[in-house]
Image (cartoon, rainbow, N blue to C red):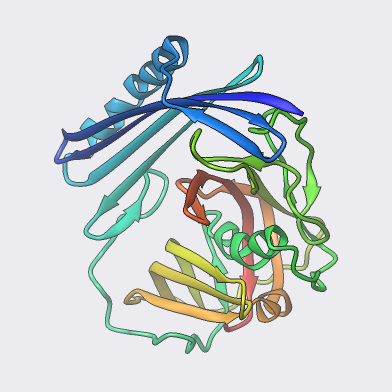
Amino acid sequence: MTHLFSIATRDELWSGGVLIESRLSHGEARCRGNEIDATDRADRVLIDRAEALIESMRAAAREHADARVRLVASARRVNDFEREEQTIAITKDGVSVLNSSPSPRPAGSVARGEGHVHVPLAWQNGSAAVLLHEAAGHPAEHHHASLQWPAWLTIRDEPDFVIDDAGDETRSVDLTRESPATLRRESFRDIPLPRMTRLIARQHDAPFAMPGERIDVHLVAGGAYEPLTGLVTISVAVADLVNGDDVTPLAPFQIRVPRERVARALLGATGDPVRYPGVVCSREGQEVVVGSFAPLIVTEAL
C-alpha cells in the first residue's frame, strides 16, 4: 500500500512576552510498504495553514510576560485527508503551568521523598490522566499484559480525526485490553508508530469518599513509563497536604511505583472527565501531543 504524507510545522519559543526563536519545518514522505522516500519539499497550502494557526496562538505567549512559552502548530495531509495539531507549553519558575491550573509556588514546609507518600491522594484538575497515561496507555503501546482495573473505570483512546498518519481509518480502543490502533509520526522523517491520540478516563457509578487526610495533587510536571521494569514515575509539581481544615503546601516530589500498584490503588472517582492540558508524549524520539482527560480520582498512598 502506498500513501503520501506531507507536513508543515511552525515551532516558536517566547520569553518575557518576546519571540526569541522560531523554526519552520516541512517535508513529505512517500511510503510504499516498509520503504519511505522522504524530502523536505515545501507545500505552500500546509505552510499557510500552520502559520495561521501559530498567529492565533501568539496572544497567549504575549500575555505570559513572566514565563517561557513554547508554541507548536502543524498542518498535515495524508493522501487527500488534511488535519491540524497545535499545543501551548507554559513554564514559570521551572514548573509547567497553564491558565486552568494553580500558579506555581515556593516549596512548602513539608517535603516528601520519592516513593514515600503515606496518605491517600486526590488527583485534581484532570491530573489523574497523566497517571493513567503512564500506567495504562504506554503499557498498551508496548503490548504489555493486561491488568485488573476497577470495574467502574474505563480508559480509552478516542481519536478526534478519521485518517491516521499512515492513511488508515482511526478507531477507538480500550487501552486496558489492546494497543492503540492509530499510527502517528512527528515529522515526515519518522516512521509511523502505534501511539495514543486522546486518552479519556471515565468513571461509571464509582464509589467516592474524600479522605479527611490526603494530598491534593494540582499540577504534574511530567511522567514516565519504563517498559523493561514496568515502573511508573510521576513528578508532582504543586500539591497540598490536607488534614481537615489545615492545608500545608508541599515541596515537589516524585512517585515511582510498579504499574500494578497503580491499578490496585484506585479507590474511587467522581465527576466527568476534565482535560489536563499540555501533555506532550515522547516515545522512540518522536514527540506527539496526546489529549488527556480524567475525572477527580482518589488513590491509596503510592
Q: Which residue is depicted at the point 55% across and 65% down?
A: 123
Q: Is residue 302 above or below residue 80?
A: below
Residue at the extreme top of the image, as rendered: 45
Left or right of residue 101, residue 203 in this image: right
Query: Closest to the observer: 203 or 70?
Result: 70
The quarter of the picture where residue 227 lies is bottom right
The quarter of the picture where residue 184 lies is top right
Q: Is residue 221 above or below residue 114?
A: above
* Residue 18 drawn at (x, y percent): 14, 33
Query: Looking at the rendering, in which quadrant would you find the C terminus?
Result: bottom right
Left or right of residue 259, residue 84 in this image: left
Q: How many discs mark residues in the rendered view?
A: 0
Left or right of residue 85, residue 146 in this image: right
The quarter of the picture where residue 78 lies is top right
* Residue 157 drawn at (x, y percent): 71, 47
Query: Closest to the observer: 184 or 224?
Result: 184
Query: Looking at the rendering, in which quadrant would you find the N terminus?
Result: top right
In this rendering, does residue 246 appear at all?
Answer: no
Query: Closest to the observer: 60 or 42?
Result: 42
